[in-house]
Image (tube, rainbow, N blue to C red):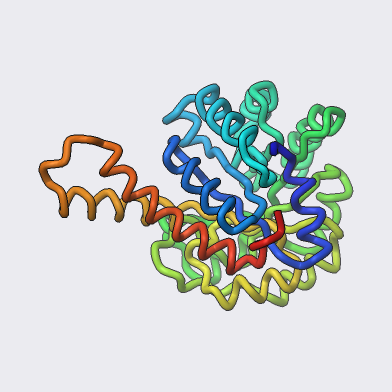
């Protein structure tokens, strides 16, 4: 069943759990994510990043997700992750995405508002939801010190103004996570999350969750985070499975028997995240 992020997050917001938003780059990853969600009877958001769209092709990504969504009873949303500009959002909108995102976090506040608002204006009339971002979630490649990461975090008063001006359905916030972390060591700023939650009344989104401790994620969900993005942890599991299969069966020539092990490893991570986020049984 194909739905929007707004549909999924409305219930998550009310019942204080989070929906997993999982990045996928190919058919096997998409299948693994949905199969795990089906087995856990959980709603799920499938995300396509700029890298995934470049790798697989926009039409191919869309067709794979829409085909799988039509043949499952669980609610599935197709979301653009970190849309870099207005045109990219329009292309995904026309292709059939049910949720869009503009990442204007590197822009001045006024420019971020302007572009995000344009996307809301084309999406909302036909029921497509929109996620905005305020504050910047750094990546491990940025090599920032703690004070620099803190300086990039979302300011509660700006969040309130941003939501008022753009009318987005969800807001991605920078509260201490870091993109592409390979170990779970980051701890979120709970006080900042509480202040943002008091300032805005829409679902909050966490990017870069793979490097955040489980306890910190649980606490953040209790404070109002409703959508949690997962990418690096999935890729690590998928590749680990492929490496394991090649090592155990060096003479194997059927790619299904190699990639299938990666898919199984990925499914276990998705299952763990669904249970951690509290959305098991919420389909």
Q: Residue at x 55, y 46 (%)?
A: 34
Front residue of 57 and 154: 57
Question: Which of the two residues, 26 or 91, is positioned nearer the viewer here?
Answer: 26
Quarter of the rendering containing residue 274: bottom right
Residue at the image position 58 percent from the left and 53 percent from the top: 37
Residue shown at the point (68%, 25%) measured from the top left: 90
**Figure disc tally:** 0
In the image, taking residue 243 as reference, residue 1 lies left or right, namely right
Q: Position of residue 47 (x, y in %)?
A: 57, 42
Side of 5 relative to 242 (left or right): right
Residue plotted at (31% across, 43% down): 259
Q: Residue 33 in the image: state x and y as whole percent.
A: 51, 48
Can you tell which quarter of the image residue 203 is in? bottom right
Give the answer, above or below, for where 97 lies relative to 3. above
Could you say which is closer to the camera, residue 130 or residue 136? 130
> Looking at the picture, how far across and down is residue 97, in whole percent?
66, 31
Kindly give the residue lying farthest to the left in the view shown: 251
**Relative side of 141 to 168, left or right:** left
Looking at the rendered image, the quarter that the N terminus falls into is: top right
Q: Is residue 110 left or right of residue 176?
A: right
* Residue 190 spot, x, y in % from top left: 68, 75
């Amino acid at each position: 069943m194909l739905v929007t992020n707004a549909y999924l997050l409305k219930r998550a917001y009310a019942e204080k759990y989070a929906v997993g938003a999982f990045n996928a780059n190919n058919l096997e990853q998409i299948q693994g994510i949905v199969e795990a969600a089906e087995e856990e009877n959980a709603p799920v958001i499938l995300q396509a990043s700029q890298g995934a769209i470049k790798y697989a092709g926009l039409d191919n990504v869309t067709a794979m997700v829409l085909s799988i969504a039509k043949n499952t009873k669980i609610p599935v949303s197709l979301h653009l992750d970190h849309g870099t500009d207005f045109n990219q959002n329009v292309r995904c909108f026309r292709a059939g995405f049910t949720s869009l995102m503009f990442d204007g976090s590197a822009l001045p506040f006024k420019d971020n508002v302007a572009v995000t608002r344009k996307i809301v204006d084309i999406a909302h009339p036909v029921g497509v939801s929109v996620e905005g971002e305020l504050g910047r979630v750094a990546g491990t490649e940025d090599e920032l010190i703690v004070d620099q990461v803190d300086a990039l975090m979302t300011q509660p008063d700006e969040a309130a103004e941003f939501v008022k001006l753009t009318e987005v359905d969800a807001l991605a916030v920078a509260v201490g996570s870091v993109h592409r972390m390979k170990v779970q060591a980051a701890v979120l700023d709970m006080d900042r999350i509480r202040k943002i939650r008091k300032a805005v009344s829409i679902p909050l989104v966490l990017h870069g969750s793979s490097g955040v401790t489980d306890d910190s994620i649980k606490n953040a969900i209790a404070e109002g985070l409703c959508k949690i993005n997962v990418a690096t942890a999935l890729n690590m599991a998928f590749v680990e499975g492929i490496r394991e299969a090649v090592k155990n069966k060096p003479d194997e020539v059927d790619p299904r028997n190699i990639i299938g092990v990666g898919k199984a490893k990925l499914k276990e991570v998705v299952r763990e995240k669904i249970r951690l986020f509290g959305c098991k049984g919420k389909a």
